[in-house]
Image (tube, rainbow, N blue to C red):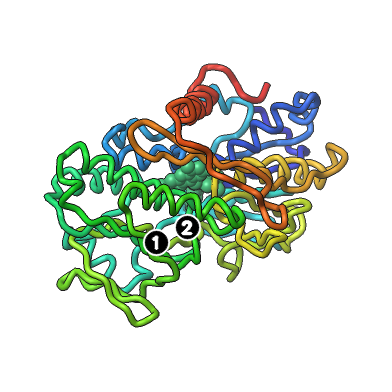
Amino acid sequence: MPQDPAAKKLLILGAGVGGLSVIKEIAEYDSAAAILDEIDITIVDEDFSHFLGFTLPWVMRGWRAADSVPIRPTEAALSRVNRVTGRVSAIDPQRRQATLADDTTLEFDALILATGARNAVDRVPGLADAVINGVAVHYYDYDAAAEAHRALSGFSGGRLMFLVTSPVYRCPVAPYEGAMLAADLLEATGVRAATEITAYTPEAQPMPSAGPYAGVELIAFLQQRGIAFHAEHQVVAVDSARRTVTFDNGTEAGFDLLMFIPPHRPAVTIGDEEWISVDTATMGTRHPGIYAIGDTTSVTTPWGRSLPKAAAFARNGAVSAARSALHYLGVIDGTEELSGQGYCYLDTGAGASSRGAGDFFAEPPQIHLSTPSAELNRQKTDEEHQWRALWETETPVLR
Ligand SMILES: Cc1cc2nc3c(=O)[nH]c(=O)nc-3n(C[C@H](O)[C@H](O)[C@H](O)COP(=O)(O)OP(=O)(O)OC[C@H]3O[C@@H](n4cnc5c(N)ncnc54)[C@H](O)[C@@H]3O)c2cc1C
């Protein structure tokens, strides 16, 4: 993209669901062409490869190969923006600069941070050793999900424990979806009857931000599939030699294979803040002209729960932050607050999915899980096809 030195600079850090949704949102404005005349847009990603999270449990189940999961935007799709491949190492809000690992600096007038969350396995004592010793696996990245599939496929029965290690993690249904898909796989390998499946979490119930109903309905799905659910169990340590997990309430539980949801940390921070607080009226951080969206943010809903780290809210954040940043740069009027409308599909096994949708900002949310069906599973698959088609294309998204 040609650069006018006088043009104002919008810098987007992270080309995953949130960062790319900012581009998609700007492309949908009637004034997109005029905006591109005035604004110089740069998007940075360490590898320009992201994924829709719900495809990872499919790798764990064995329905997808790990290398089929990454979505890589083409040069053509991003042809109207500056594309920089590099790892962001620091953001200086005062000097209006982001620094990359190779010491390149990128200047900005407005910034949208969308670098998401990372797994932080080392935050639970003993967990990394359990992985190294081959008794614990997870499915929160491509390779790990493939490893989890290998471990489950070779599992000959015994105690399979699903463990949510921290209340802050991506996708509130993913642990329970994982447990149901594991049960589905073990049916197929013939060892389900010889396997006790348990799910432990620090949460009072699954999907706590979805209101009083969805979590109870999810527990019923688990019970129907013979999966025992244990709420309010916060792990403090894992002992891979004894194959036990110790919880903060003093209890201990044993496993033969541990399938865990890793602790998370933000991929990039600003100053000493961990998860970044934003004003949901604009997605603004405490630094003027700097916005944050998606998994890297911390938003408390009016009902007093944490807004889930889910694709729907990364996209909603992009809608709000795109407007706010362009308004800050003086090229459009008005801002738009973060929408609390969200949804999630939940695979229950045997090719069926349930869906929960509604307003997460309601007091309380009135979200219910629908009866699982093959049709909902097809809709979920279509969602990936549509998103992938938008970015793996020869057509520029911004024109
Ligand atoms: C197992 C699993 C299951 C999930 N299931 C669902 C689901 O069913 N439904 C749902 O809605 N959500 C689900 N999610 C969550 C969903 O994937 C995220 O909420 C969503 O991707 C968040 O978008 P984001 O833009 O904040 O982060 P991401 O999509 O993760 O994008 C972050 C981008 O930043 C880049 N990046 C990171 N650090 C740096 C750096 N230092 N420098 C440069 N670039 C960097 C990355 O390469 C990546 O491209 C799931 C997630 C997982 C892991």
Residue 116 visible in rendering: yes
| The label number, if any, that marks residue 164 in the structure image | 1
The residue depicted at 59 percent of the width and 53 percent of the height is 210
Residue sitting farthest toward the right: 333
- Where residue 354 sits in the image (x, y, percent)? 48, 38
- Where residue 316 sits in the image (x, y, percent)? 66, 42
Label 2 secondary element: loop
Neighbour tally class for label 1: few under 14, some 14-19, many 20 plus, Cα within 10 Å: many
Contact check, label 1 and label 2, Cβ < 8 Å: yes
Left or right placement of residue 199 versus residue 329 in this view: left
Q: Is residue 351 above or below residue 132?
A: above
**Which of 200 and 100 lies nearest the eye of the viewer?**
200
Question: From mark 1 to mark 2, how far is it between C-alphas?
Answer: 8 Å
Q: Is residue 243 above or below residue 375?
A: below
Instruction: Identify the residue position indicated by label 2 in the image.
Output: 169
Q: Earlier in the sequence, mark 1 or mark 2?
A: 1
The residue depicted at 70 percent of the width and 54 percent of the height is 290
| The label number, if any, that marks residue 233 in the structure image | none
Q: Is residue 290 above or below residue 44?
A: below
The residue depicted at 61 percent of the width and 47 percent of the height is 367
The residue depicted at 49 percent of the width and 61 percent of the height is 205
What's under tag 2, amino acid-wise? Answer: Tyr
Label 1 secondary element: strand
- Where residue 107 sits in the image (x, y, percent)? 66, 49
Residue 100 visible in rendering: no
Q: Quadrant of the C terminus?
A: top right
Neighbour tally class for label 2: few under 14, some 14-19, many 20 plus, Cα within 10 Å: many
What's under tag 1, amino acid-wise? Answer: Val
Q: Quadrant of the N terminus?
A: top right
Residue sitting farthest toward the top: 394
